[in-house]
Image (tube, helix red, strand yellow):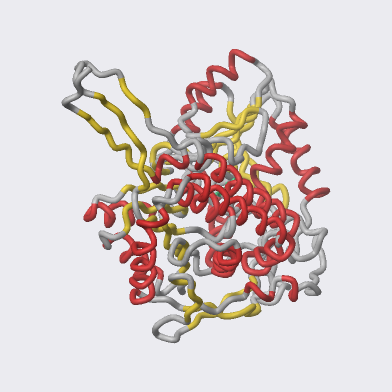
Amino acid sequence: MLSSSSSSSADQYQRFLIDQAYIGGQWRPAVSGSRFDVLNPATSEVIGQAAECSIEDAQAAVAAAKDAFPSWSTTTAKERAQLLQRLYKLQLDNAESLARLITAEMGKPLREARGEIGYGASFLEWFAEEARRINGSILQSPWKDKQLSYRKEACGVAGIITPWNFPNAMITRKLGAALAAGCTVVINPAEDTPYSALALAALAEEAHFPPGVINVVPTSRQKTPEIGNFICDTPDISVITFTGSTEVGKLLLKRGANTVKRIVMELGGDAPFIVFDSADVQRAVEGSIVAKFRNAGQTCVCANRIFVQEGIHDQFVAALAAKMSSELVIGNGMDEKTTVGPLINDRAVEKVKSHVEDALSKGAKLVQGGKKLTAKNNCYFYEPTLITGATKEMIIAKEETFGPVAAIFKFKTEEEVLRHANNCRRGLAGYFYSRDYAQIERVARKLEVGMIGINDGLLSTCEAPFGGVKESGLGREGSHFGVDEFLHVKYVCLGGLQF
Ligand code: SIN
């Protein structure tokens, strides 16, 4: 189904179309004076320009963050918490404009963009609360004359490199934790979505964060490696937190090794979504719509390989096809009826197209969808697609599609599906549907992933640890673990005590 587009509310986010970087508490053009175009992927129209920062701007941002660190890291946790609370409230006060900004620069449907603003705000609130629970401890000493303790201290300046698929929440999940710990930050947002990052800086300024605590250096695709390399190379950044592809994560990890940086990474997934014969089929269909089509399939935790046991296979496929036809409305995200927006750019569309073509050429059957929309004047829509008969020889079984394609793999036994699901170098999220308690416990133990949704297709929340195993990442975000990624543990041995 195709919905019509609407362009009425551009003015609500206009003030956040900022064409400058935010460094040391000041808005500045890039040193070179260059700017780059930011496109709306639903229309391919230019919505504005952003500062094209280069290494000189990144150096200034890191210097500002370094200067601000001694004072920020010695504020009380309560002071940091109050500022984070203020930012949280400002994000909610500006929720509608920020949501429209997300839809304008990355295309997701408004209802999802509104959800992202609430989700993003929850990390600011959560880490405001966590700031006041960063404690040390007195340890049992084996010596009468020595007291042993440890304390937790902010690591230093954090380099935050973020993706376009959640342009607000992937920043707040990192920013909230870093600020709560007492780190200052330099944010390099994805080139497709600089405005959501700059909007956060504008709100942080309004919240009265001290100059230099938060710095934002946007840049173009061409200049991104230059900034990324600088963030890795400079000894003035102590920790890098990155969400993005496994390929780029490995480059950052190698390059960051030269200065022995702490690196937190949330990388690609290839989530298995398993429906056993014992499942509640209707519930599994509803879960697969969320896990597969949220953000047009452009989430790292997206169901990428849908395994369905042979006993309920045909029933599941028929019910999923019916649900897709009745619920998925493709169109401009600004239209309230839209549930599936465009993909981020032409490369994303080409990737999805090649995965579907490869699967069909190797024997998969097209149930519905399967086409790039061409009528929409050079923009990036791909139909929600359902294919059956997927096999492990297909690219779709080996690579993250990052698009609205549900590929169904039929299986016979639990042992077979676990072997297939785990035969993968990535392990971010996994999902399965079963009403057999022994099976639930067995499969939860054996699935090689960092997060599992059992009888549920949506697991992300600020309270829970987000992260993967294998090549899906290092460390955890959100939850009480998230803040630890920005803290050093310092052991203190106090000798010469006399009692
Ligand atoms: C991601 O796709 O990287 C994040 C998704 C989420 O937080 O749910």
Q: Inspect this view and state whether residue 210 appears.
A: yes
Residue 459 horizontal side relative to residue 60, left or right: right
Left or right: where 194 falls relative to 138? right
In the picture, which quadrant includes the N terminus?
bottom right
State the residue at coordinates (64%, 25%): 276
493 is higher (above) or lower (below) than 225: above
| Corner quadrant of residue 380 | bottom right
In this view, the residue in front, 53 or 473, is: 53
Figure check: 44 above or below 420: below
- Of all residues, the one furthest to the left in this rendering is 496
Q: Is residue 131 above or below residue 434?
A: below
Name the spot of residue 346 as percent of width and height, x first.
Answer: 56, 69
Residue depicted at x 33% and y 71%: 59
For the point 61% across and 46% down, the residue is 125
- Which quadrant does the C terminus fall into? top left
Residue nearest the observer in this picture, 481 or 432:
481
